[in-house]
Image: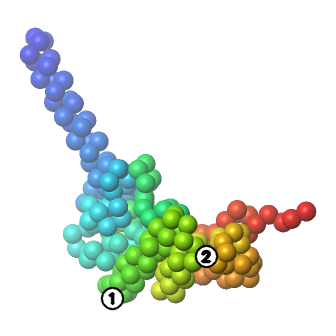
Amino acid sequence: MNKSNLLLALAVTCSFLFALDLRAQSGPAKSGAGSTYVVVKGDDVPGIVRKVKYADVTESQMYYAVVKTNINTFSVNTVERVTPGMRLKIPSQAEVKKVDVKTADEYMANLRKAEGIYSEGVAAEQKGDMKLAVEKYLAAAKIGHAVADVRLGQLYDKGVTKTLPRDLQESISYYQSARDRGREIKGPDNRAPQPTK
């Protein structure tokens, strides 16, 4: 094999491997089988949903299915729900098609509203404004935001704010609300403080 043929073969092989790598990062093949999506820098949940959406389902159906499937994977303490390297399960086409369109549309409308409010709460907390943060978390939880429920449970658990007292009954009720919405709550650090001696 001469040098030019060797270089051509190497270039073709590299192109093929690069295409496979891009396909693996961009989500499932449109075959309808469920798969895993690896989050890359710059991704957000709506963008991922658009990348992996099956042709014969609505965006709301796909979003609903992806969120419900990954509710325990999403980040709690940051505005970004996904971070690079995170692995999201992508439900199969058949699973997504089972989602009622009206249910998905209503869920998405509420989620968008609650997510915006929750994000304002996270931003306020990061600035040290716990009064505003708690206000926002309460408003988001009232709409049905499971992550807001978790955050309120944590804050009531610890009683570290001047806005909320340490109240294990309230903590438990918010954790239970998060569970009812599909969020997994486990272990002493996430459920309740360690018993004092």
| Callout 2 amino acid | Leu
Say if 21 sits above or below 141 in the image.
Answer: above
Foreground mark, 2 or 1? 2
Left or right of 180 in this view: 50: left
Question: Residue 100 placed where, x, y %?
Answer: 35, 85
Closer-to-camera residue (16/48)? 48
| Callout 1 amino acid | Lys
Say if 41 sits above or below 171 in the image.
Answer: above
Quarter occupied by the C terminus: bottom right
Left or right of 40 in this view: 182: right
Callout 1: 10 Å neighbours few (<14), some, many (20+)?
few
Residue drawn 41% across the image and 50% down it:
84
Residue drawn 71% across the image and 72% down it:
159
Callout 2: 10 Å neighbours few (<14), some, many (20+)?
many
Residue drawn 15% across the image and 24% down it:
9
Left or right of 193 in this view: 79: left
Callout 1: SS: helix
Quadrant hosting residue 151: bottom right
Question: Residue 50 placed where, x, y %?
Answer: 26, 65
Question: Residue 87 placed where, x, y %?
Answer: 44, 54
Quarter occupied by the N terminus: top left
Distance (Cα) linking label 2 and label 1: 29 Å
Quadrant hosting residue 81: bottom left
Q: Which residue is mark 2?
A: 152
Residue drawn 10% across the image and 18% down it:
5
Quadrant hosting residue 107: bottom left
Q: Which residue is mark 1?
A: 102
Callout 2: SS: helix
Closer-to-camera residue (84/182)? 84
Q: Earlier in the sequence, mark 2 or mark 1?
A: 1
